[in-house]
Amino acid sequence: MPPRTAPAAPTPPRKVPLRKLLRAASVACGVQFGWALQLSLLTPYVQELGIPHAFASLVWLCGPLSGLLVQPLVGHLSDRLAPAASPLGRRRPFIAAGAASIAAAVLTVGFSADLGRLFGDDVTPGSTRLGAICVYLVGFWLLDVGNNATQGPCRAFLADLTENDPRRTRIANAYFSLFMALGNILGYATGAYSGWYSIFPFTVTESCGVSCANLKSAFLLDIIILVITTYITVASVQEPQTFGNDEAQNPGAEQEAFLWELFGSLRYFTLPIWMVLIVTALTWIAWFPFTLFDTDWMGREIYRGSPDNPGETQRYHDGVRMGSFGLMLNSVVLGFTSVVLEKLCRKWGAGLVWGVSNIIMTLCFLAMLVITYVAQNMDYPSTGEPPTGIIVASLVVFTILGAPLAITYSIPYAMAASRVENLGLGQGLAMGILNLAIVVPQVIVSLGSGPWDQMFGGGNAPAFAVAAGSSFIGGLVAILGLPRARIASSSSSRRRGGTHR
């Protein structure tokens, strides 16, 4: 009898080339282009429509409230969608649908003043435009729904393509962060330029002046970039047909209710996952006051302008444009940090890198408080232009903050993706749960920052003081509570059959 031959070992799936991961992450550029326009231009714009500064932060509740359910729900649905059910697989249909929602939303926001006039708004400068505010809020809500519906599946798409390999997952998220930086650079550069209305002259109307027309024109550019980058992502690579522990392979889970599954999954989380969520929450409590009031701070505290006072409006908008320029510099540093982030994590460990970045955030927010105090107690020239030293110091702070922002955009997602691998959760649901640690702090800050600022005179400094304290605590928790080298070495540890501490 001939000897029985052992069955051939299954051929391991071929890894997706890094160049295709790069293309798969490119939609982040288009999404972030619009997000940068939101951050730099929309807080001043809502105040032009007549919403007081104290309530401007409440408008931004749209984002975290939509993200509270939209991103976990979309992630859950994309986990459950069978890859064969769509020619685009299970993640890319949601990415395309989210991008379409963003395009519709930016048109609604950009033309809100014109639509408000059709509803009978008084377009006299200084008047409250109730119709435009309502249209704006609908568009802004849809915009944040689109942002959440796009970014969650895209992060999960990258995790699927990297097959939960920690190193490749970090690289993929670094690519995502790099494209976010590119989108930020383009978006903030667009927001800093005041002549778009001359290129798109039809945007200037009786109800939409020059600053409004610039916003409208910038959003038209956003749609073009969004369409291009979405196509590149959707056409970049085919999704894998097997997904390890993802829920699409678990028929019994189909009977579970979504909310029960979302919150019920929390009981399976280990302490390292909870530490990631805690540090993420503290980090975003620190970031949200800055992202909400960065250009407004430059226009009010540094340039001493006001969107409500006609005599100070020009100074305010000069400050907003200077703030947009600072955010563009911020994005350059963000992009550079994204390129070197993997090397930093291999050398020092993801936990230590994250913790140090939060300490840098603390120092920057404290520097903003110092700059605010100096500006308030300094005599400005008769022209009203801030001294050069104050402007330079403000721009330096904005620029430095690009490094911790790159880490915030990358490390938490890579850590979460790596740690849920053995919990039986789909990557879409996992990204949605991580998003809860982002949006819940945003809700708290949105509700509290306006009244908190009013208690101390109505400026932005009190919110930045909270940001400094939260980032400092988050940095300490990250340094003391997150592993320094385990994530960086987990692949090699598994190959050796041991655990690296």
Image: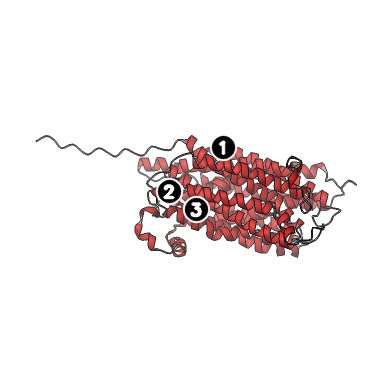
Seen at 36% across and 56% down, the residue is 250
Q: Amino acid at mark 1?
A: Val
8 or 249: nearer the viewer:
249
Residue 364 position within the rendered picture, expressed as x and y whole percent measured from the top left? 68, 48
Left or right of 2: which side holds 460? right
The colour scheme applied to this rendered structure is: secondary structure
The residue to which callout 2 is attached is 86
Which element type, helix, strand or loop, lies under badge 2?
Answer: loop
Q: Earlier in the sequence, mark 2 or mark 3?
A: 2
- Furthest-front residue in this view: 118
- The residues tagged by marks 2 and 1 sit, at their Cα atoms, a distance apart of 34 Å
The residue to which callout 3 is attached is 431
Which quadrant holds the N terminus?
top left
The residue to which callout 1 is attached is 339
Residue 195 position within the rendered picture, expressed as x and y whole percent measured from the top left? 76, 41
Which element type, helix, strand or loop, lies under badge 1?
Answer: helix
